[in-house]
Amino acid sequence: MTLLLLCGLIIIFLVVMNRSKLYSIIPFDFKIIESVSKKEWFRNPWLSGLALFFINTVYFGLTGLILFLLMSLMVPFLHLVIMLAAVVSSILTWTRSVNRGKGRNPIG
């Protein structure tokens, strides 16, 4: 378990040090964010924050459902991969929606 924590810290360190390179690899255009960013309610920080909260609630529910459905599989560390995918999708959603239309790089 200590080795897993150490590997995670090393990966976080590498991501932080190379965030501008990694951010240029990830595409910036999500169709749903483009369509929602044109709406007036999305420009209100309270309403857009509420929408992002519900999106994260859906992500959390889907992740929990996937983990529940895969409980019978005895594959080691599969739950960690699923949780990593959930965290990455949540972070991408937040960075893309919060900084949409500002014309700047939210990470670097």
Image: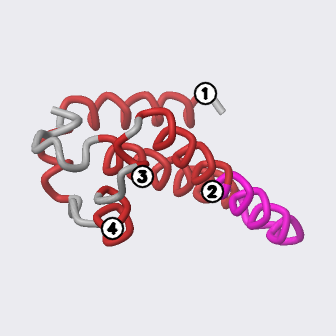
Pointer 3 and pointer 2: residues touching (CB < 8 Å)?
A: yes
Neighbours of disc 3 within 10 Å: few (<14), some (14-19), many (20+)? some
Q: CA distance from mark 4 to mark 3?
A: 14 Å
Q: Earlier in the sequence, mark 4 or mark 3?
A: 4
What element does badge 4 sit on? helix
Q: Which residues are magenta?
A: 58-77
Q: Which mark is residue 93?
A: 3
Residue lying at 26% horizontally and 42% vertically, measured from the top left: 99
Residue lying at 29% horizontally and 59% vertically, measured from the top left: 38
Q: Which residue is mark 4?
A: 35
Q: CA distance from mark 1 to mark 4?
A: 44 Å
Q: Which mark is residue 59?
A: 2
Q: Earlier in the sequence, mark 1 or mark 2?
A: 1
Residue lying at 31% horizontally and 56% vertically, measured from the top left: 37
Q: Nearer the viewer, mark 4 or mark 3?
A: 4
Residue 106 vertical position relative to residue 52 in the rendered view, above or below:
above
What element does badge 3 sit on? helix
Verify whether residue 75 appears in magenta.
yes
Amino acid type, mark 2: Tyr
Along the viewing direction, whichever of 46 and 106 lies nearer the viewer: 46
Verify whether residue 88 appears in magenta.
no
Residue lying at 25% horizontally and 49% vertically, measured from the top left: 100
Q: Which mark is residue 13?
A: none
The spot of residue 46 in percent (x, y) is 49, 33
Q: CA distance from mark 1 to mark 3?
A: 30 Å
Q: Nearer the viewer, mark 1 or mark 4?
A: 4
The spot of residue 108 in percent (x, y) is 15, 32
Q: Which residue is mark 1?
A: 2
